[in-house]
Image: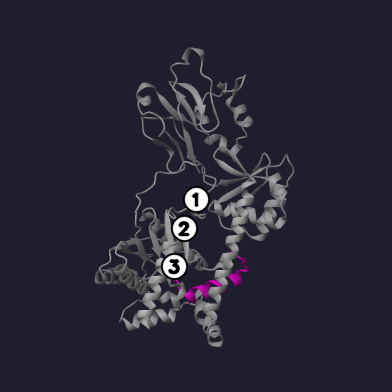
Amino acid sequence: MHNKMEAKFNQHLNMLLGNLPENASVLDHSPASLPEKRLPEKAVNETPRLIVALSGGVDSVVLLHLLANFKKHHPAYSVLAHNVNHGLSDNAEHWGLFCAELCQKLNVPFISSTVKIENKSRSSLEALARDARYQCFKDNMLKNDVILTGHHQDDQLETLLLALKRGSGSTGLQGIRSTQSFFNGHLVRPLLIFSRQALVDYAEFHQLQWIEDESNQDIDFDRNFIRHQISPLLIQRWPAMAQSASRTAQLCQEQQTLLNEVAQQDLGQCLVKRLSCQTLDIASLAAFSSVRRNNIIRFWLKSNGLQYPSSKQLTILWEEVALADVDKQPKLQLVSNTICRYQEALYIVPMQSIKTLEAPVTWLGESFLWLDEERLGVDFSKVDPAVAKQHHVQCCLRQHLDAKLTCLPEGRNKARSIKKLLHEYQVPPWLRDHVVFILVDNQLTEAVGLWRCQPNASNVSNIPVMDLSLYSR
C-alpha cells in the first residue's frame, strides 16, 4: 500500500514539476503597473531546487520523507528543507531542533529562519504567521526554485468551508491550488491528492516521528473549529466529502482560469500606458457589461498584487470613483493602496510615497542607479559608462529644479515651465514629485519616460543622447 503511495506521489510530483512554466510570472507578485524594466535577477538554477516548508508536523514530515525518496529516482533535483520559527510557542525552538535532526537523518540540507510576529487580533494571527513565513522563503529563493508545502485533502475541505463562511465567489472556492507562481519561482502542493489519514498511516508505517502544535487544538481559530468540530461530522456522514470538495475546487479553478483568460483579453482594450503606470480607461470600461467590467477590474487589481475587491468595493469604485463628476478627484482607499481617477482613467496609487531626496544623485557609471531603494531607480545599462567620466550626469526630482526653469521638448515649438509640461503630459498630481529629471553638465536634458529637451545650439554637439528607462512602484 505504502509503496503504491510513494509511486503515486512520484508520478504526481513529476507531472506537476513538468507542467511548471520556465519563468515565473505570477499575478500576485508581478504588478502590471511596473515598467518593462525589472530589477536585476537572482541566480538561476537550470534544475530548480525543491525546498520543503518543514514545520515538523506530520504532513511536512511525510512530504520530506517522500521527497527524499523522490530524489533517489530523480537525482538531478536537489532537495532542501526550510523551517521558520514564528516565536508563537514556547516549544518553537524544540521544533526547530527536531526538524534539523530529521534533515540530518535523511541527509537533506536544512535552512532555519526566525521571525518576530506582532500579535494583533487572534483572527489575523494565522495570516500574519503565513506572510512572515512566505517572506522567509522569498529571502532564500533562487530564480525558479520550488517551495513545496504539505497541504492535503482535509486542508482543502477546511479552506472551502471557510470560503463559504465568508461568502466567497468562484475565486474563493478555488481553494488551495496544486501549483502557482511564487515570487521568482513556484509554490507546489503535491499532497493535495492524499487525505490526512493516509499521511498518518504512511508516517506510522515508516516509524516517522512528528510534533503536534498545541495551537492546532484551539477551536477559537476558525480553521481549527472546522477541523475538530465540523469536518469529522461531514466525513462521518459522507466519507468521500474531502474528495468531493477537492473536485469542486478543481472545477472552480478551471472556471477561474477561463474568467482570467477573458479578463486578460478585455483588459488589453482598456489599458492605457501613462508614464510608468498601466491605467484603466474609463470610457473603454463603460463599453462592457457590468459583470464583464467587474471581471476586468478584479483581474487588473489582482495582477497588480492587490487582493480581490469585495462586491461593495467594486460598486463604490465604479459608481463613486469612475463615474464621479469631471471636476472631482474621487478615490477608493484599500488596505495598502488607493484607487484614484485622473484624466478619465483609474490609477493604483501606493500609500507609501517615494522618499524625499536631499540633493540630486550623481551617476558614476553604474548600470542601475537607485534613488529610493527598490522603489525608484534609473536604468543606465544602455549607456557607455565612459560618459560618466566625460560629463557630470545627475538624477534629480522636481524639487531640485529652479521653479522658473523652462524646457523645449523635442517635437515642440515653444518652451514651457516644468509645471505646465507635467500637466500637458498628463502626469497625475501624486506622481509629479516622482518624475526623474536628468541634468548633464548642469543642463536639463530629459524627463525620463516623458520627453527629451532640445539642446541649446551652442551645446548640441557636446550633450550625449542617453537611452534611459525608469523603474518605479
Among the two numbered marks 1 and 2 on one chain, the one whose residue lies closer to the N terminus: 1
Asked whether, in this view, residue 272 is left or right of residue 82, the answer is right
Check the picture and name the quadrant holding the N terminus. bottom left
Q: Are marks 2 and 3 in contact (CB under 8 Å)?
A: no
**Residue indicated by mark 3:** 189
Magenta-span inclusion, residue 166: yes
Residue 399 screen position, x and y as percent: 52, 30
The mark found on residue 386 in the picture is none
| Quarter assignment of residue 214 | bottom left
Extreme residue in the right direction: 325
Above or below for 462 versus 373: above
Residue at point 51% right, 55% down? 28
Residue 219 screen position, x and y as percent: 50, 77
Magenta segment, principal secondary structure?
helix
Q: Are marks 1 and 2 in contact (CB under 8 Å)?
A: yes
- For this rendering, which residue is in front, 29 or 94? 29
Residue 126 screen position, x and y as percent: 47, 67
**Residue indicated by mark 2:** 181
Span shown in magenta: 150-171
Residue 222 in view here: no
Residue at point 58% right, 69% down? 251
Residue 334 screen position, x and y as percent: 59, 53
Mark-to-mark CA distance, 1 and 2:
10 Å
Asked whether, in this view, residue 457 is left or right of residue 287, the answer is left
**Residue indicated by mark 1:** 30
